[in-house]
Image: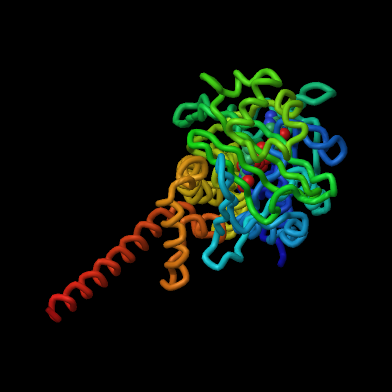
Amino acid sequence: MPAEPLTWHGAPARRVAVVGAGLAGCLLATMLAERGLEVALYERRADPRVGGPERGRSINLALSARGIDALARVGLADAALAEALPMRGRTLHPRAGALGFHSYSADGTRAINSISRATLNAALLDCAEKTSGVSLHFGHTCTGVDPATGTLSFDTAGGQVTVPADLVIGADGAYSAVRRALQFREGFDYSQSFLPHGYKELTIPPTPDGEFALDPGSLHIWPRGEAMMIALPNLDRSFTCTLFWPKDGPGGLSTLDSAEAVTAHFAEHYPDAVPLMPTLVEDFLRNPVGSLVTVRCAPWVVGRVALLGDAAHAIVPFFGQGANCAFEDCVELGRCITDAGGELSTALALYGERRKANADAIADMALENFDEMSNKVNSRLFRWSTRARHALERVVPGYVSRYELVSFTTTPYSRIEGRVRTQDRLVAGALAAAVGSVLLAWRARR
Ligand SMILES: Cc1cc2nc3c(=O)[nH]c(=O)nc-3n(C[C@H](O)[C@H](O)[C@H](O)COP(=O)(O)OP(=O)(O)OC[C@H]3O[C@@H](n4cnc5c(N)ncnc54)[C@H](O)[C@@H]3O)c2cc1C
């Protein structure tokens, strides 16, 4: 398809700067270059394909329908899935007693996919690099941007540089420098809220005979009420565990500062995991504690600058949607460029309008899902209601659970709560009508 001429308020627009060569930045750079733009992709790190991934970032993540749909648009979905392990449900690890498996979908076949962040980022970088029109600039730390002119400043090993751009996209993550440049302007709303919990990554290596120590076909959860540990499988047959635990207070992460304290904590809360984690103490004392932040801001577009991915809407990881949502932003921005006939100022305005409510919706659902994963899954009522929903999905045409709508469809996030409420009302109404008819029939027979 020939690329349509892209404009900024009617004048030809060619040079786009994307700040941040993480997951979303690489995908967006590829998509924009495929439309005929010259895209300069700036990244503060050295090339992670050469130097290895940065410490302190999550090791693997769950890729689901929205991310797969976005990757398919640049021909990367099959390659990514070939490097991923499907997880068809949750395995719950109680403190004592048998494990319980709960499938994510009614028919038990649908899966979210555990993939290494570094592998996915490297594949996206390769894809961007191969796309005509993309140039990669590592070792460039963005320090500021002028939204009126699109001029960017960077710190580099050779000193400060400034570069011009017709359009700037800030895809530089939760602590975005591009967003910071907009933050103190009148009319720019911004909030960040941290959970009292931190997270720490640990590992379950393969067994001595080289096998997975747990079922690799599910996401493992140790739900402990106010806190939890999860584990996702890796292709090398290890699992990456993430412990979500209050940072401070009695028994908080900050108090687990000795081998004895760590061992006692895990023996109490995760007794079945301890024998599988031979390097637990070293890993625990060495690995950093990460923060769990929700960032909301508006507008996402100021002059020639737009925000995308975590830079626009960092969310907590409990629905496994941060990267999926960031990828979906890229798809929506492309759609807006088409709908605006290639006029980028109109496209950006449309993108901000269409996407913000969706990001707010998944931010709320992600926060709620912490309680579901760490606490509600323990209750019989919750397990019964999940089974009931799956049964409804099998018998009621069009009934789809919230989890499935989020993870296995591209239904806009902002429509999901409404749809679930309507479905539940209809089912409750049908049930009430059925019970009423049975009662009436019973009375008529007496
Ligand atoms: C513990 C944890 C688990 C998660 N699990 C999942 C999951 O299962 N599924 C899921 O979908 N999401 C998950 N996420 C969320 C996901 O990691 C993010 O939503 C996703 O990485 C966002 O992509 P991004 O490209 O917007 O930002 P990032 O991936 O953070 O990329 C930003 C890039 O910008 C660069 N950068 C930063 N500052 C500058 C600067 N000043 N100048 C130049 N470059 C800069 C960074 O180095 C980085 O390369 C998880 C997050 C965490 C913390």
In the figure, is residue 24 to the left or right of 430? right
Residue 12, percent across and down? 66, 50
Q: Quadrant of residue 245?
A: top right
In the image, farthest residue toward the right: 50
Residue 323 at least partly seen: no
Q: Report the residue at 63% width, 50% height from top.
A: 219
Please tell me which residue lies in front, 76 or 135: 76
Please tell me which residue lies in front, 65 or 16: 65
In the image, farthest residue toward the bottom: 445
As displayed, is residue 261 above or below residue 440?
Answer: above
In the figure, is residue 264 to the left or right of 15? left
In the figure, is residue 319 to the left or right of 391? right
Residue 374 at least partly seen: yes
In the figure, is residue 65 to the left or right of 82? left
As displayed, is residue 228 above or below residue 115?
Answer: above
In the image, farthest residue toward the front: 97
Question: Which quadrant of the figure shows ligand 1?
Answer: top right
Q: Quadrant of the C terminus?
A: bottom left
Residue 328, percent across and down? 59, 52
Please tell me which residue lies in front, 154 or 56: 56
Q: Quadrant of the N terminus?
A: bottom right
Residue 127, percent across and down? 79, 52
Please tell me which residue lies in front, 268 or 66: 268
How many numbered marks have been drawn onto this rendered protein structure?
Answer: 0
Q: Report the residue at 76% width, 45% height from top.
A: 238
Q: Report the residue at 81% width, 38% height from top.
A: 48
Residue 256, percent across and down? 63, 21
